[in-house]
Image (cartoon, rainbow, N blue to C red):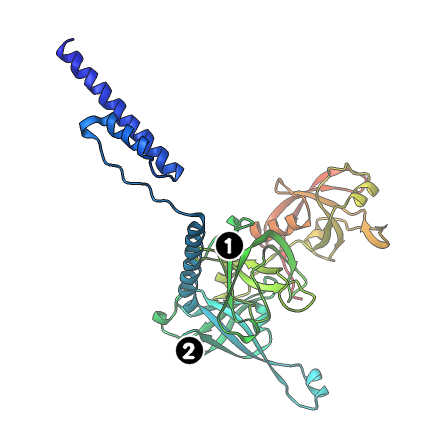
Amino acid sequence: MSKHSNSFHTLIVGLAAFLTLVAVTTLAFFGGLALSPHLHSVAQAAVGEAAIELAPATVVEPAQQGENILAELEATFIDLYQRALPSVVDIEVTQLVTAGTANRFGQEDLFLQGEGSGFVWDQAGHIVTNYHVVEDAKTVKVSFADGTSTRAQVIGTDPDADLAVLRVDLPASELQPLVLGDSDALQVGQLTVAIGNPYGQDFTMTSGIVSAVGRTIPSSSSSFSIPEVIQTDAAINPGNSGGPLLNRRGEVVGINSMILSDSGSSDGVGFAIPINIAKQVMPSLMTGAEYEHAWLGISGTSLSNEIMEAMGLAPDTRGALIISVAQNSPADQAGLHGSQDVLTIAGQEVPYGGDIIISIQGEPIADMDDLITYLIEHTRPGDQVTLGVIRSGGARKNVTVTLGVRPNN
């Protein structure tokens, strides 16, 4: 055999030995097992005089693995709380009760105390909370976790979105804004943390998950609805209103607003206004101006099987049924029609027969929630939009509407 052949043979044997060692080591690592004495000796023999002494793989018992995971989760929550705490505030409000109510108590003036939560928006002193926390406020006091307390001024409100902006006169160095997340990116099952002041218990943290996304709820302070609301099972109670709903990275994804409960306390169904709506509204409110929402001027509902059958529609029809059209509204001026007939379903009278909006600007509308969401997220007063409509009787047409400004309640 030639010199070159001997070298080539040595190279092949060496490579085979190395691959054998790698294969055995990989098996031990991914199997979570230490090498047996037999395998160890085989590996050593394979590499001959260049054999490498292998250290036994670390065996991690299931109980220890569970403990490690819990420890990491605890550390995450502790770190999140400590980082967010300087940005969360307790809000105490003195509200003046109307004279008629006060007179029933035999007093000229009657003041009530209210409490809520909020968080630092920027280093210019802006604090975000719910509108219903500071509604009709006579005085507002903001307190931080380090004991700092100061008077706050309400500088902007949006009852339709249930949002309000306060301003405090503190040095920028003492204000630590929270990082804003992206509520549109939320998925059901993601971890959530709420920090606030439930029942006056200052700076309480509760945790849970995103239970649902895309809910539409009525504003507690106006006749309009708020779309894309986040549902969470993190405990939210009276006093949490206005506080932040955070993801596991400590980013604000929502502003805790209300609960669904027969008892008045948390039943695991809480709602938070999506932070992306706040991002949209805040620039106007911080200047003291009102945020003007686009207005179509209808009330409506989603299609049910009974309504589709009564109107002779295909079972797969989707859209928002117009129940009524406000007089002189953009919808009225565009010639949209409300429902004129009544259908009895399960003993209740349900309007039907009006125009059905099935698209806006070419985007399909599956239900009334879709229409509300599109108008809030993608339109402003003065915009012209084209609505795809099914008329009573089945005729389809496009209707152009110039959107107006929502009227005050």
- Name the residue that disc number 2 marks: 147
Q: Residue at x 48, y 52 (%)?
A: 182
Question: Residue at position x 81%, y 46% from top?
Answer: 353
Of the pair 408 and 305, the residue shown nearer to us: 305
For residue 191, the mark is: 1
The answer to which image quadrant residue 250 occupies is bottom left
Residue type of the residue flagged with mark 2: Gly
Q: Where is the N terminus found, in terms of image quarters?
A: top left
Where does residue 150 sit, x and y in percent of width and height?
A: 44, 79
Secondary structure, mark 2, is loop
Q: Is residue 129 above or below residue 211?
A: below
Rendered position, 350 above or below 220 = above
Rendered-image quadrant of the C terminus: bottom right
Front residue of 375/199: it is: 199
What x and y, as percent, mark residue 47?
Answer: 23, 27
Image quadrant in which you'd find residue 328 = bottom right
SS state under label 1: strand
- Decide which of tag 1 and tag 2 comes sooner along the chain: 2
Could you say where residue 122 lies in the image, as x and y percent from the top left?
A: 41, 65
Q: Position of residue 39 (x, y in %)?
A: 32, 31
Q: Residue at x 68, y 53 (%)?
A: 330
Mark 1: give few (<14), some (14-19) or many (20+) Cα within 10 Å: some
User: Closer to the camera: disc 1 or disc 2?
Assistant: 1
Residue extending farthest to the front is 37
